[in-house]
Amino acid sequence: MSEDLKVEGGTREERYRSLLPQIEGLLAGETDLTANMANFCAALKHGLGFFWVGFYLVKGDELVLGPFQGPVACTRIRRGRGVCGRCWETGRTVVVEDVTRFPGHIACSALSRSEIVVPLKDAEGRVTAVLDVDHDTPGAFGPADERWLTELLAPLEGGGAR
Ligand code: SME
């Protein structure tokens, strides 16, 4: 794996397509989950130009901040709280077009305007972590982002990399 990812230019769709094999290659060479989550965040943040990319890990009855790229963020989120807690509680991806209209949204940064949160599950289907991606413009995420992010996360699912 070279030091620099090559995902410059093109549409977001093209960037995702270009990033997929690079992320798969990056994660295939390492079994440590923290290391893989850290590189995943860096690749996605810098490859796609998002405002904030990070993981929150299920620890007891809270989500706790894990590897991320972007401005400092809140460290603990209770189940059902905010967008991340909703994703954990429902086990489903949550897309928020306008964070000011999501009741209970947790504003780690006033610059974040839209958000997508995707769950990671173990082999039994329990949510073990969530991936949170924030954008500084409203309405930045849709079904295509959900599909691509779910595919990009596949190597980290099922406890495959610990
Ligand atoms: N906005 C999230 C909190 C995490 S930050 O965006 C990094 C939420 O409402 O759960």
Image (cartoon, grey):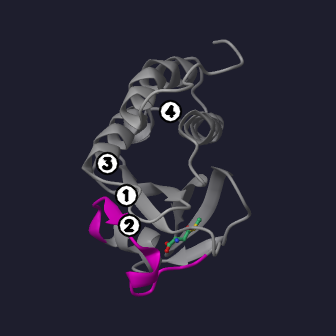
Q: Find the magenta span and give its range.
A: 90-107
Q: Indicate if the residue with disc 3 has its beta carbon within 8 Å of ligand 1.
A: no
Task: Please state the horizontal and vertical placement of residue 101, each as a whole percent of the image.
Answer: 39, 83
User: Which numbered tag is attached to residue 161?
Assistant: 4
Please report whichever mark, 1 or 2, sits nearer to the chain's N-terminal start: 2
Please report whichever mark, 3 or 1, sits nearer to the chain's N-terminal start: 1
Please report whichever mark, 4 or 1, sits nearer to the chain's N-terminal start: 1
The residue at 45%/75% (across/down) is 99
Q: Where, by quadrant of the figure, is residue 160 drawn?
A: top left
| Gap in angstroms between the C-alphas marked 3 and 1 | 16 Å
Secondary structure of the residue carrying numbered label 1? strand
Which numbered mark, 4 or 2, is in the foreground of this view?
2
Please report whichever mark, 4 or 3, sits nearer to the chain's N-terminal start: 3
Circle 3: is it few (<14), some (14-19), or many (20+) Cα within 10 Å? some
Q: Quadrant of the C terminus?
A: top right
Q: Is residue 99 above or below residue 7?
A: below
